Amino acid sequence: MNPLKVDVTIVGAGLVGMAAAVALHQAGYEVVLVDSQLPQSNEHQAEWDQRIYAISPKNAQWLMRLGAWQLLDVSRVTEMQAMEIWGDATLEPLQLLADDVNADNLGFIVEERALKHALMERVQACGINTLFGHAGESLNASARQAVLNLDNQQSIASTLLLAADGANSWVRQQLAIGTQQKPYHQTAIVANFVTEKSHNNIARQWFTQDDAGKSGVMAWLPLAGNKISIVWSAPTQYANRLLTLNADEFAQQVMAAGHSTLGGLTLMGDAVAFPLTLKKANELSQHSVVLAGDAAHRVHPMAGQGVNLGFRDVIDLLQILASKHQYQHINDASLLKQYSRARKTDLLTMLALTNGLYHLFESQNSVVKKVRNWGLSATNQQPIKKMLVANAVAL
């Protein structure tokens, strides 16, 4: 089989990998998109996907420029107009409103499946070469090029290889790039509900405690109509008990954690669960390879920034490549160092937020409890709120 020669090989056809393929193609690079799995059927499914993402306004605009956003079914995309955050002992929530900074919204709630299908449509419309259903067999990366060998004897030589193949990245393992990991000792339970009352396009979040006093985070994200998607990051032992409940019992627990804010809840489909672990790669680039998305970092879902971080990886990479001089190769060591520095700065900012909140609400110290709830109340001052909303919209 003749070897392929391209500018960029992208390993991983998830949201970040497909978006990167379209963006790099639009920037004029010859791209091949590789994934060990075959793509899922693009047939529309009536059931709501359990995997829901909050997409920031800036990333929604970027996806629009890629031609993917406008392919989404508008009846399944929900604008977030506001966010309400409760502490474990606050009577009034911290309210963050898009109107505080004259923004149209704080972001959009989108199903993973729908966004994947839209991006795949763009990959196909752009005529991007795809190799699906074949796993990587070996990877040889040097300062000159990256050569990927697949299990079907296909060889791909590229100036740059972008690894977007998930938290257990095969590419990262081939390069022996280590990771820093920290278990949160929490399990995220994801489920969709029909609500008795309107959510009014408000995302809601509570810092909760189980009967043993251990902290968790409950998030309610608005879906089209009277529907919400919940992400309950609960202490693992408690989460395991929740998962044994029947649909009505589980709905009662979710209602109680959210103080019945939206009245009665009816479960749609099944709840799914996954353990929460902080993971970040020790290096974001090596030779002619860069890591992006979950292959580079995985953070706590409380800030809703997982896929947004991945999209920003790609955006930063494209900006850096656009700044190179005429005779500089796209795998030039100085360019890849710029990428690593830029992404580490963004990641450290996000980790400071998520880890700080996690440890603040995990503490059982009575003084810390008083301070954190006072802090949420104090933050409900207009100048501070405006700063928080402006930062959220700018992500």
Image (cartoon, rainbow, N blue to C red):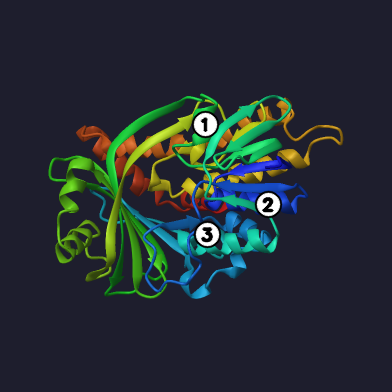
Q: Nearer the viewer, residue 105 or 235?
A: 235
For badge 3, the amino acid type reads: Lys
User: Crowding near pointer 1: few (<14 within 10 Å), some, many (20+)?
Assistant: many
User: Crowding near pointer 3: few (<14 within 10 Å), some, many (20+)?
Assistant: many
Q: Secondary structure at mark 2?
A: helix
Question: Mark number for residue 172?
Answer: 1
Query: CB of mark 1 within 8 Å of CB of mark 2?
Result: no
Q: Is residue 391 visible?
A: no
Return the x and y of residue 222 as percentages of the image width and height. 39, 65
Reply above or below: 260 against 13. below
Q: Residue furthest right?
A: 326
- In terms of sequence position, does the residue under pointer 1 or pointer 2 come before the other? 2
Write down the residue under mark 2. 23
The alpha-carbon separation of the residues under discs 3 and 2 comes to 15 Å
> Residue at 22% of width from left, 71% of height from top?
264
> Residue at 62% of width from left, 35% of height from top?
148
The alpha-carbon separation of the residues under discs 1 and 2 comes to 22 Å
Left or right of 331 in this view: 108: left
- In terms of sequence position, does the residue under pointer 3 or pointer 2 come before the other? 2
The alpha-carbon separation of the residues under discs 1 and 3 comes to 23 Å
Query: CB of mark 3 within 8 Å of CB of mark 2?
Result: no
Q: Residue furthest front?
A: 1
Return the x and y of residue 377 as percentages of the image width and height. 34, 49
Q: How many marks?
A: 3
Q: Secondary structure at mark 3?
A: helix
> Residue at 54% of width from left, 40% of height from top?
151
Query: CB of mark 1 within 8 Å of CB of mark 3?
Result: no
Left or right of 3 in this view: 371: left
Question: Mark number for residue 116?
Answer: 3
Residue 235 placement: quadrant: top left
Reply above or below: 346 against 34. above
Return the x and y of residue 167 as percentages of the image width and height. 45, 39
